[in-house]
Amino acid sequence: MKHIARKRFGQNFLHDNTVLADIIAAIAPKPGETMVEIGPGLAAMTDLLLKSLDHMHVVELDRDLVARLEKRFPRDKLTIHSGDALKFDFGAIPVPEGQKLRVVGNLPYNISSPLLFHLADFAPLVLDQHFMLQKEVVERMVAEPGTKAYGRLSVMLQWRYRMALMFIVPPEAFDPPPKVDSAIVRMIPIADPLACDAETLSAVVQKAFSQRRKVIRNCVAGMFTEDQLREAGIDPGTRPETVPVEAYVALANLLKK
């Protein structure tokens, strides 16, 4: 019986074999690695990954799909975590000593940003992440200061990861086809990110980008003085999208003091 994609779960199933092969090549799975896939869906990618891996984990919210996965894969090949990836403890997956977790997935577009922020909490445990996301979201993730796409998502993720847009995937590669292009992003956690409190940085960045058209001294008025902005290496008359990640970290550390 065919599974009907559910809008409430943001389901779009990848079926293009060429795209799938390109994704597997980008991930380059190897025997002995510990890998978790978020939202395996109809297991198109899971199948291909398991050709190289001894075993893997998946996190799936849709109970009908969980039942399909349980019938299709033996337990010694696939551990299924039935539940919401937004609440899942990725640190609970057992990893051999000296190894780190690899995370992959075709992420539901309706929860992509909160899921990326949730995963950032586990960055020290992760070797790398490869995700399919809406192209526009990936462009925001990798955007450089001074560009229109640069914003809160760029700063918060670039503080923790080195990222690259690998390639673009057209809508017709999916069933049902989404209304937008998708893209594959590679995320490699930074071993020693600049020291900073994540919640403080988030509050600073949210305030800074709340009024993008204004200069930064007006955006963060009441939170920072002009002297504090200069202390962090920021021209008070510049716009928020021109301020680099390290300057936002410096601001957050000033606020934390």
Image: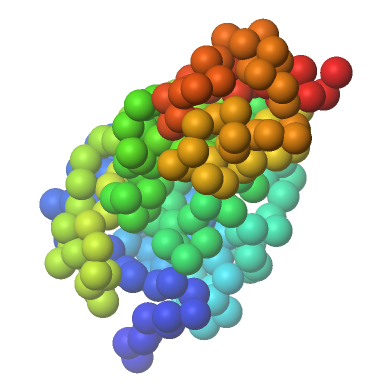
Q: Is residue 129 above or below residue 37?
A: above
Query: Which residue is farthest bottom?
Result: 1
Q: Residue 46 location in percent, x, y?
A: 39, 56
Residue at (44% x, 42% y) in the render: 213
| Quarter occupied by the C terminus | top right
129 relative to 24 in the view: left or right: right
Residue at (36% x, 86% y) in the render: 4
Foreground pick, 217 / 170: 217
Q: Quadrant of residue 82?
A: bottom right
Color encoding of the figure: rainbow
Residue at (35% x, 26% y) in the render: 146
Query: Which residue is farthest right?
Result: 257
Foreground pick, 62 / 72: 62
Q: Is residue 89 above or below residue 156?
A: below
| Quarter occupied by the N terminus | bottom left
State whether residue 107 appears in this view: yes
Q: Residue 193 location in percent, x, y?
A: 62, 17
Number of disc labels: 0
Q: Is residue 170 above or below residue 227?
A: below
Q: Residue 190 location in percent, x, y?
A: 55, 20
Q: Residue 179 location in percent, x, y?
A: 24, 70
163 relative to 78 in the view: left or right: left
State whether residue 50 appears in this view: no
Foreground pick, 47 / 88: 88
Q: Is residue 153 above or below residue 112?
A: above
Residue at (52% x, 52% y) in the render: 113
60 relative to 186 in the view: left or right: right
